[in-house]
Image (tube, rainbow, N blue to C red):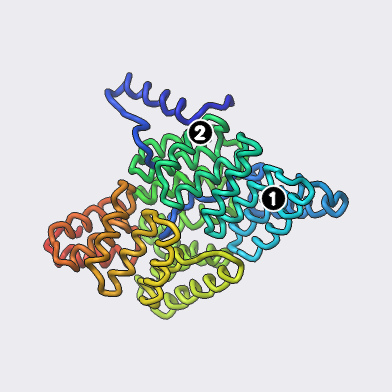
Amino acid sequence: MARISVRSAVAVVALALALTSGALVVGGGPGGDGAGRSTPAAVGPAAPLDGLRGGDLDRGVEALRTRLREQPKDFTSWATLGTAYVEQARTRGDPALYRAADRALDRSLELRPGYDAALAGRAAVAAARHDFRGALRHAEAALAENPYSEPALATRIDALVELGRYGAASRAADEADERQPGVPVFTRYAYVRELRGDTASARRVLERALDGATAPGDVAYVATALGQLAWRQGEYKAALRHCGAALRADSTYLPALECRARARARAARGGTAAALAGLRDVVGRQPLPGPLVALGELYEAKGDPARAREQYRLVDVWAALARANGVDPDLDTALAEADHGDRAEALRAARAEWERRRTVHTADALGWALHVNGRDEEALRYARRATATGFKEAAFRYHRGMIERAVGDEAAARGSLTSALRLNPGFSPVGAREAREALRSLGGDAS
């Protein structure tokens, strides 16, 4: 398939729809990461490693180690190994592998100073550790050496998004699309659009990316992004369909397994049992905060608080492991602590993260942490900021509605809570239930 930029592809789609159905405006301002409760899973590997996932990735790492024992001065293989360790850490949920990535990338740069692939690998490690300023610095250094480095172009977009620099992220996505159109850039381009509320463009871009994906890893990656987008819009059957396609490409791809489990809880009668089984499988392989909290809330909604508490406690275990390996876990833990743990710790973590980066996600986390600590007037400022870009995230609208109710603005609260439940009525087993109860107390329609 010929490589075609996202903007060209979207323009073709827009023209076709305009000719057949009237008017469609695509690609205005910048707008449009997972079914998780913090940043959606758009932030993944900077570039798929030749489509490798799961066992293929593990075999690839072993092959690289074997080669490097025979050719210890092969700087290219050291850089590839470092990037592969980053992907292994992400897919396994094992931050200890970032240290191995550091060593491999450092060795590559010792052998070839300024090597762009190793610099791009350093950017990926920094992003994985949530050091987004460092990720941006390393990505820019890699691009100074090679302006067409696909991993560096993708990680630069990730870093700008995670720093809340959405206008710059949109420009970086346009530039990356011009230089290296392909799956890693297309998925970032779509997420930048989604952040501005342009889910229609985001979906079309991801569909285009899926059409061009051939390697199983790429198919799984893009189909899961489509499933997560559908989940956030409450389109559970579509989420199941896309995640099913991802798992047909790679049956071990954990983000797809997680997305499918969440969607099953809402898409069919008896789905809760399937969702519990699916999420238990996910956290057994990758005990990250998002799936741990999701599993805990399913147990809580099912009336099993003891098992729910077990999952919430594991978030603290993960956070300790993350910190020991240089990962900043504050955004991941702030919401979990606010809802299910130490409220004072939630506020500390949320404030710390807000000082590091000012995004819609950190605004939402800080607003909610302030609310659960009884500081509602202050909380409302952040809740409004979290919803200001148009990003269609039901949890943000729920949080804003509950804060508006707490400050006595009942009309606004009814609007926000209604909007949350219409967008994604199953956004959280516990949160959705509380949203319906609050809406009924306000005289709204919680059906």
The quadrant of the image that shows the N terminus is top right
Image spot of residue 305 (x, y percent): 39, 78
Image spot of residue 177 (x, y percent): 51, 33
In this rendered view, identify the residue nearer to me: 214 or 182: 182
Q: In this view, does 117 lie to the left or right of 284?
A: right
> For numbered disc 2, what is the local secondary structure?
helix
Q: Quadrant of residue 149?
A: top right
Q: Is residue 350 left or right of residue 118?
A: left
209, above or below 304, in the image:
above
Q: Residues within 10 Å of mark 1 (few under 14, many from 20)?
A: few
- Measure how far apart labels 1 and 2 are at the Cα level: 32 Å
The quadrant of the image that shows the C terminus is bottom left
Amino acid type, callout 1: Asp
* Residue drawn at (37%, 21%) of the image: 15
Lower position in the chain sequence, tag 1 or tag 2: 1
* Residue lying at the far right of the rendered structure: 70
Image spot of residue 130 (x, y percent): 52, 58
Image spot of residue 239 (x, y percent): 42, 48
Residue identifier under label 2: 175
* Residue lying at the far bottom of the rendered structure: 306
Residue 366: image tag: none
In this rendered view, identify the residue nearer to me: 328 or 428: 328
In this rendered view, identify the residue nearer to me: 419 or 391: 391
113, above or below 430, in the image:
above
Q: Is residue 24 left or right of residue 65?
A: left
* Residue drawn at (32%, 55%) of the image: 386
Residue 27 seen from this side: yes
Task: Please name which of the two marks, 1 or 2, marks the residue nearer to the observer.
Answer: 2
Residue 56: image tag: 1
Amino acid type, callout 2: Glu
Callout 1–callout 2 Cβ contact below 8 Å: no
* Residue drawn at (37%, 25%) of the image: 14
